[in-house]
Image (cartoon, grey):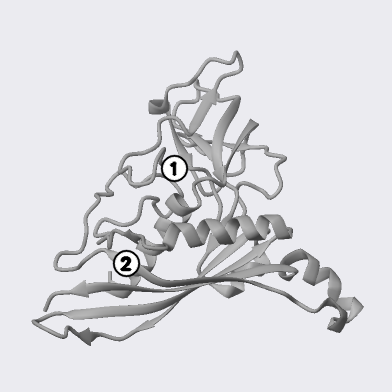
Amino acid sequence: MKRIRTEDLSIHEYIKNEVLKDFIETDTAILSYMEDISSVGSYVYAAESTMAPSPVSLGRGWKYVDNWGDTTEQQFSVIVYDEYGAIISGSNYLIDYIDGRVICSDPNIIPYSVTYNWNYISVVDEWVLVETSEVPIVVVDISGFEKEGFQLGGGKRVPRQVTLHIFASDTAERDDIMETLYDGLYNKCCPNQLFNAGTLLDWNGTFNQNYAYSIISGSSSLRFENVKAKSISIPLLTIPNNEMMMLSDVNRYRARVQFEVFHWEEL
């Protein structure tokens, strides 16, 4: 995996799992058997949530670690029950954290309901994905980079410009998210991870049991500086009435947090 990609993943993980950790919601839902995608040895049950926005909409998903920085799968963020209310041991199933599903290998173990923590704010890394999710949304927009030599000695300082675009449902929510992001970045840093065994979640949404925390050798942590935040006011009187509906859904309550991220890299 190239360095620029590992930096993107490190920043994305830090923002979603650490900076926005106070925007975690809890839900309890009935599980329904999904016969169409189940097979022998893989019995799939999906949570029937009525929450809005949907816990499994793009950029959200169930919480897969109990605390940011954990390298092992959560033990307390998701609890599965049988029809009598007894807790089913986690050794009897897998969890698809992206789609909100419980996957059993034994047909005699039948989960009935689940209580789980989920990410209220959608965090995505492409503008095009905004229209396919539900507010609130944070778009992580990371630009290219340039490598600058140290003033003294060997090595390089590698800076990049980052913009966080915030889409909220009202002004209070917008301001809360903006201030939380600002406080989580100002005078802060995050590990510059290697991800040599992949990310915490595997391609199918289950926890990556091969994940091993490691940082890039010869590189400092990723440091944030020049953090700036501002709300974006849109003059509603200049917008045609036929565009007001789309505006109210996504673009009416917006803000932006901009900063520079850099690390030192040995030669």
Disc ID at residue 64 = 1
- Disc 1 + disc 2, Cβ < 8 Å: no
Work out which quarter of the rendered image holds the N terminus and state it. Answer: bottom left
Which quarter of the picture shows residue 176?
bottom right
Can you tell which quarter of the image residue 41 is in? top left
Query: Residue at point 32% right, 79% down?
Result: 159
Q: Which mark is residue 126?
A: none
| The one of 125 and 187 positioned closer to us in this rendering | 187
Residue 135 vs 52, above or below: the answer is below
Q: Residue at x 83, y 76 (%)?
A: 236
Q: Secondary structure at mark 1?
A: loop
Q: Is residue 51 above or below residue 198?
A: above
Q: Nearer the viewer, residue 189 or 89?
A: 189
Residue 248 placement (x, y as % from top left): 80, 66
Location of residue 142 by image quarter: bottom left
Q: Is residue 73 left or right of residue 25?
A: left
Report if residue 2 is visible in the image.
Answer: no
Residue in front for this viewpoint, 104 or 157 = 157
Residue 161 located left or right of residue 245: left
- Give the secondary structure at mark 2: strand
The residue that label 2 is drawn on is 223
Q: Amino acid at mark 1?
A: Tyr
Kindly identify the residue that appears in the image at 33 percent across and 46 percent down: 69
| Identity of the residue drawn at 47% across and 55% down | 16
Residue at far right of view: 241
Q: Residues within 10 Å of mark 2 (few under 14, many from 20)?
A: some
The CA span between labels 1 and 2 is 25 Å
The amino acid beneath tag 2 is Arg
Q: Percent position (x, y) of residue 152?
A: 11, 83
